């Protein structure tokens, strides 16, 4: 029954609009996407898989928090938003420093490890853009008008798939540069540039 409800009466257009909006809003440059690119460029795909998996899991958790109304509840607590913003900025700046100081791939040893799965999860939770972007995309579309619960479930499923796709695409974009960054000087310049972009997108998301 739900398939008939979802894909009748123009819902195909609504679904396409949701996907395109998620690409434009959630997939645009931001702290999480830039961190995927920077980590892929600095450490390569294999070492970055744990980090990107954590980021996907964390972003999905943000999506579930938005879908279930947890975000609205948290934001109603006085002062909590400012505390979370400061904490997220500090953590993301730490990740930017880790990327900026990563050695070239050709000189990495066992001690030079990409950020962990837990670091990726924390980045997603701390990423201010994720909360704003997911909330905007999730609340801006309706796929199942006859059932709010089915609508929320379907949108969450679609956006979860988009979260996975977006993170992997940005990781691959960064990893595609890895072969060009084995030169120590080029690698250092690129890592610092990525770190600055990461810090800048975080600031833009916090002070929008």
Image (cartoon, rainbow, N blue to C red):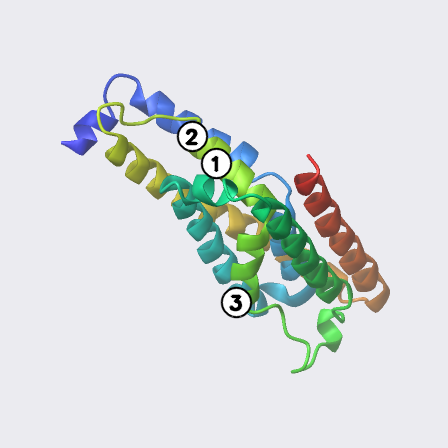
In the orientation shown, which residue stands out farthest toward the top?
9
Say if 15 sits above or below 33 in the image: above
Residue holding disc 3? 118
Residue 123 seen in the current view: yes
Question: Callout 2: helix, strand or loop?
Answer: helix
How far apart in space, not on screen, are marks 3 and 2 (Cα)?
Answer: 28 Å
In the orientation shown, which residue stands out farthest toward the right?
185
Circle 3/circle 2 CB separation < 8 Å = no
How far apart in space, not on screen, are marks 2 and 1 (Cα)?
Answer: 6 Å
Please give the name of the residue rendered at 83% of the width and 58% of the height, measured from the top-left corner: 189
- Front-most of residues 195 and 125: 125
- Badge 3 crowding class, 10 Å Cα cut-off, few under 14, some 14 to 19, many 20 or more, is some
**Number of the label disc, if any, that sits on residue 135:** 1
Circle 2/circle 1 CB separation < 8 Å = yes
Q: Position of residue 34 (x, y in %)?
A: 65, 50
Q: Quadrant of residue 87?
A: bottom right
Residue holding disc 2? 139
Please give the name of the residue rendered at 71% of the width and 38% of the height, measured from the top-left corner: 207
Question: Is residue 86 rendered to the left or right of residue 129?
Answer: right
Question: Is residue 140 rendered to the left or right of residue 122?
Answer: left
Question: Is residue 50 rendered to the left or right of residue 92?
Answer: left
How far apart in space, not on screen, are marks 1 and 3 (Cα)?
Answer: 23 Å
Q: Position of residue 10 (x, y in %)?
A: 30, 18
Residue 41 seen in the current view: no
- Badge 2 crowding class, 10 Å Cα cut-off, few under 14, some 14 to 19, many 20 or more, is few
Q: Quadrant of residue 158?
A: top left
Q: Quadrant of the C terminus?
A: top right
Q: Position of residue 180 (x, y in %)?
A: 74, 59
Q: Quadrant of the N terminus?
A: top left
Say if 126 sits above or below 47 in the image: above
Question: Callout 3: helix, strand or loop?
Answer: helix
């Amino acid at each position: 029954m739900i398939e008939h409800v979802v894909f009748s009466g123009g819902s195909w257009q609504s679904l396409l609009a949701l996907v395109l909006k998620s690409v434009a809003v959630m997939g645009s440059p931001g702290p999480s996407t830039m961190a995927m690119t920077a980590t892929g460029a600095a450490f390569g795909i294999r070492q970055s898989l744990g980090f990107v998996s954590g980021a996907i899991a964390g972003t999905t958790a943000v999506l579930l928090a938005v879908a279930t109304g947890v975000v609205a509840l948290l934001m109603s607590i006085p002062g909590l938003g400012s505390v979370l913003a400061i904490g997220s900025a500090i953590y993301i700046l730490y990740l930017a420093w880790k990327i900026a100081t990563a050695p070239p791939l050709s000189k990495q040893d066992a001690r030079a490890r990409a950020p962990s799965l837990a670091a990726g999860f924390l980045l997603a939770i701390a990423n201010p853009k994720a909360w704003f972007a997911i909330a905007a995309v999730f609340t801006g579309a309706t796929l199942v008008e006859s059932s709010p619960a089915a609508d929320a479930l379907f949108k969450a499923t679609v956006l979860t798939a988009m979260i996975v796709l977006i993170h992997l695409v940005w990781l691959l974009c960064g990893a595609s540069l890895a072969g060009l960054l084995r030169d120590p000087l080029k690698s250092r310049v690129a890592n610092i540039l990525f770190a600055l972009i990461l810090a800048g997108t975080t600031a833009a998301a916090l002070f929008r």
